[in-house]
């Protein structure tokens, strides 16, 4: 089998196509969640906290210097807080979607019950009989 035909077979498998669709939808969903957090959730939180805009919160380690044209060195922990909130929203949404899908799926067929083996008393009696033989 040539490399090209192997590659075509790999690409045409169902799970590769499903993964590609999932990545595209996930990217679009990520943009929606980012907009939800930045434009709808964070403004009321900023209002409640006294006008604090989390995306601009940072710890400046070295301020920018215009004379030497050096950029500011800062830890942007506000952007990190926004990202954590986005992660929690995405995780909650995915959890709810999976939970809804699981409700819609039919339950798996019941497994056949295992054949009944000897009882504990029967096993102990057999062990005792073997021990008495020796």
Image (cartoon, rainbow, N blue to C red):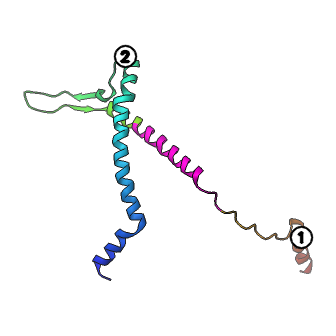
Vertical relation: 109 (above or below) 9: above
Magenta stretch, residue numbers:
86-108
Quarter that holds the C terminus:
bottom right
The residue that appears at 34% across and 52% down in the rendered structure is 24
Mark 2 closeness class: few <14, some 14–19, many ≥20 residues within 10 Å? few
61 lies left or right of 132: left
> Which quadrant holds the N terminus?
bottom left
- Residue 80 seen from this side: no
Instruction: Name the residue that disc number 1 marks.
Output: 122
Q: CA distance from mark 2 to mark 1?
A: 75 Å
Residue for point 35% across, 37% down: 34
Residue 13: image location, x then y, percent: 40, 69
The residue singled out by tag 2 in the image is: 50
Percent across and percent down for residue 29 are 37, 44
Residue 69 percent across, percent down from the top left: 9, 32
Q: Is residue 24 above or below residue 66?
A: below
Residue 95 inside the magenta-drawn segment: yes
- Up the image or down, 87 lies above or below 77; here it is below
Magenta stretch contains residue 134: no
């Amino acid at each position: 089998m040539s490399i090209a035909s192997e590659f075509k077979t790999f690409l045409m498998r169902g799970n590769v196509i499903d993964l590609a669709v999932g990545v595209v939808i996930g990217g679009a969903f990520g943009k929606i969640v980012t907009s939800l957090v930045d434009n709808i959730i964070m403004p009321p939180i900023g209002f409640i906290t006294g006008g604090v805009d989390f995306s601009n919160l940072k710890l400046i380690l070295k301020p920018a210097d215009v004379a030497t044209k050096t950029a500011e060195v800062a830890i942007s922990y506000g952007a990190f807080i926004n990202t954590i909130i986005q992660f929690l929203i995405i995780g909650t949404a995915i959890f709810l979607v999976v939970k809804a899908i699981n409700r819609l799926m039919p339950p798996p067929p019941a497994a056949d019950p295992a054949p009944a083996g000897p009882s504990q008393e029967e096993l102990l009696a057999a062990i005792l009989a073997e021990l008495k033989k020796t």
